Amino acid sequence: MKLARIASFVHKWLALLVGVQIVFWVGSGLFFTLFPIEQIRSEHLIRETAPQTIDTALLPAMGALRGPNGELPTKLIVEQRPGGQVVLAEFADAPPALYDARTMRRLSPLGANEASAIARAHVSLATAPSSITRITEASPEYKGALPAYRVHFNEGGLSVYVAENTGAVTARRSDLWRVYDTLWALHIMDWRNHEDFNHPLIVAAAWLTLLSVLAGVVLIPYRIGFGRRARTSAPAAGAPAAPKPPAG
C-alpha cells in the first residue's frame, strides 16, 4: 500500500500542476484534426489561372539588365503576372527587383495600388480590399519578405501579403488561420514567436505529464478493487477471530 500512496500523491499533484496544459494539448489537437491544413492556408481561395506562354524573344534583352548600382544579377526568373510578363532579378548584394519583360523598366518597389491589384488577382474574392498597410517589421502573423503590403479583405478576415520588391504573394492569413496560430502557440507553449517546440518549458511539462500518467497507471489495480479485495480478505485489527469448528 505504500506504493499506492506514493503513486496517488504523485498523480494528484502533478495533474494539478500540468492539468491546464493537458487541456490545451488535447483541445488544440482536436481543432487541428477538424480543419485541413489547406483550408487553414486559404488555398481554396487561390484563383485558378490558365497556363501562360513565356515569350522567348524577350530573353536576349535580359543580358543588359543591371541593378540600381550597376550590379549584375545572379538569377533571372521570367514570370507571367496579371499585368504581363515580368523579370524577377536576384542580386548578390542587393534586394531582388522586378522589371517589365518588354521594356526592362524597373517596377519595384511596388506601391499600394500595385500590391492591391496583385492581391485581388491572387484570390477569388468578389469584394474589394478594405485596407492596405505597408509592413516593415516581422510579427507572429507574418515573417516573410520585407517590406511588404498587407492587403486586407473583410470576407473571412483574409489578409494577403505582397512583397514590395518582388510583387510575390508571400502569405495568406485568415481569421481561421489566426485561431489555428493561437492554439498552436498554446500547444507548443511558445506564446511569443509561436514556432519553438523544443524549449525547456515544454520539455519539462512533457516529462511531468508522463510521470503523472505513469503514476495513474500504477493506481489502476487499486482503483478497480485489487487493493480493496486484499484488505477485506484479512481480518481487521482488533476483530474477534472466527470460532473454530467443533472437533469430530
Image (cartoon, rainbow, N blue to C red):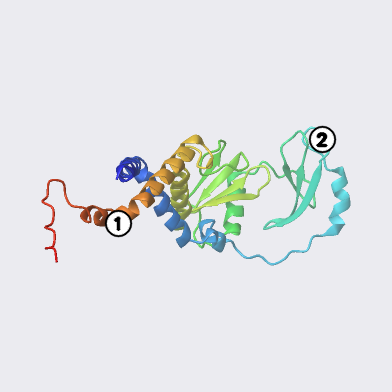
- Label 1 element class: helix
The percent position of residue 36, horizontal first and vertical second, equals: 51, 61
- Label 2 element class: loop
Label 1: few (<14), some or many (≥20) within 10 Å?
Answer: few
Label 2: few (<14), some or many (≥20) within 10 Å?
Answer: some
The percent position of residue 243, horizontal first and vertical second, equals: 11, 58
The answer, for residue 233, to whether it is visible in the render is: yes
Residue in the foreground of this view, choosing between 51 and 100 = 51
Q: Mark 2 points at which residue?
A: 71
Residue in the foreground of this view, choosing between 43 and 182 = 182
The residue at the point 41 percent across, 43 percent down is 211
Q: Mark 1 points at which residue?
A: 226
The percent position of residue 229, horizontal first and vertical second, equals: 25, 57
The answer, for residue 189, to whether it is visible in the render is: no
Disc 2 residue type (three-letter): Glu
Q: Quadrant of the N terminus?
A: top left
